[in-house]
Amino acid sequence: MSQAKAQAKLHTDSQPTIATPSHTPHLEAFKQVVESRRSVRKFTDTPIPDDVLRDCLRLAMLAPNSSNLQPWEFYVIDSEKMRHRANKICMNQNAAKTAARLIAVVARTDNWLAHSQQLLREFPIKPVPKKVKDYYTKVVPLDFIRGPINVLSAAKWGVIQTLRQVKGPIKSPYYTFDDVKNWATNNTALAAENLMLALRAHGFDSCPMGGLDEPALKKLLNLGDDHHVVMMIGAGERADNGIYHEQFRFDYDQHVKHV
Ligand SMILES: Cc1cc2nc3c(=O)[nH]c(=O)nc-3n(C[C@H](O)[C@H](O)[C@H](O)COP(=O)(O)O)c2cc1C
């Protein structure tokens, strides 16, 4: 079969197996999910079934994440007493008060080492390839290690600067608590977006909320200094008056730079 015929056949097959610029499998469904997601501020009384929420959280955790270290946690606030307090901590926003489910999305800065070790235990290839073992036992610890009150960071910075002069680009490691916090929150925010899109794909909606009292929420959830609330997500079925105005964004060219 000629290449052109093979291409044509691919386009007419109901389940094309590879993406092409003119026909990407599931593109329409993807667009529908992304384009219909809105921040919904009022939800109906319809509950989100446990199995649906579980599937959405499973999909959230399929988000890409740095070195697969998965620094995220999701606190589904189910108890009525906690929920009442959590609504208040979210400044009694409608998106919290009317939500069928309220989920605190939390990033952790203290479990990269434990997760490196867990990753080696659960790695799908056995025996674990030496390269992978070396990566998680040597490269990752060097990336994160700072010592108490960043005592090792100045030396680490010096070594990296020298190596850059000699070898060229070296991946920036983490020197401060804020560097690690950025790392953990970046990864966790990707999972949060997956969660909101998964809810949409299941026919439900969400509202991400940063308008909350973080210390009060950490106290309520009994979270330590290495837990960071990335956002609260209110979720439920969209009420008719749940969207306040049509969606709009600034001009495409304001944000996209081809360099
Ligand atoms: C990190 C973050 C924090 C947000 N905090 C709030 C919030 O506290 N309350 C609220 O009503 N919406 C909140 N939003 C929703 C935004 O206002 C909303 O995404 C934006 O206006 C665009 O609207 P759209 O999501 O419907 O496209 C937040 C969104 C993000 C990503």
Image (cartoon, rainbow, N blue to C red):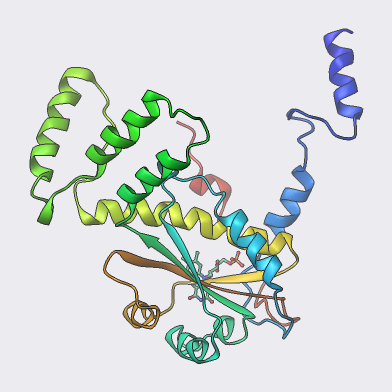
Residue at (40%, 54%) from the top-left corner? 71
**Residue located at (17% from left, 24% from top):** 163
The spot of residue 140 in percent (x, y) is 30, 38
Residue at point 77%, 50% (across, down): 29
Q: Foreground residue, 220 or 4?
A: 220
Give the image location of residue 61, x and y in percent. 54, 54
- The percent position of residue 221, horizontal first and vertical second, equals 40, 78
**In the image: residue 176, left or right of residue 79:** left
Q: Is residue 186 left or right of residue 94?
A: left
Q: Count the numbered circles shown.
A: 0
Query: x and y percent of residue 223 in the render?
Result: 34, 73
| Residue 22 in view | yes
Residue lying farthest to the front in this orientation: 127
Q: Quadrant of residue 96?
A: bottom right
Please indicate whether residue 94 sits to the left or right of residue 137 in the image: right
Residue 119, placed above or below residue 214: above
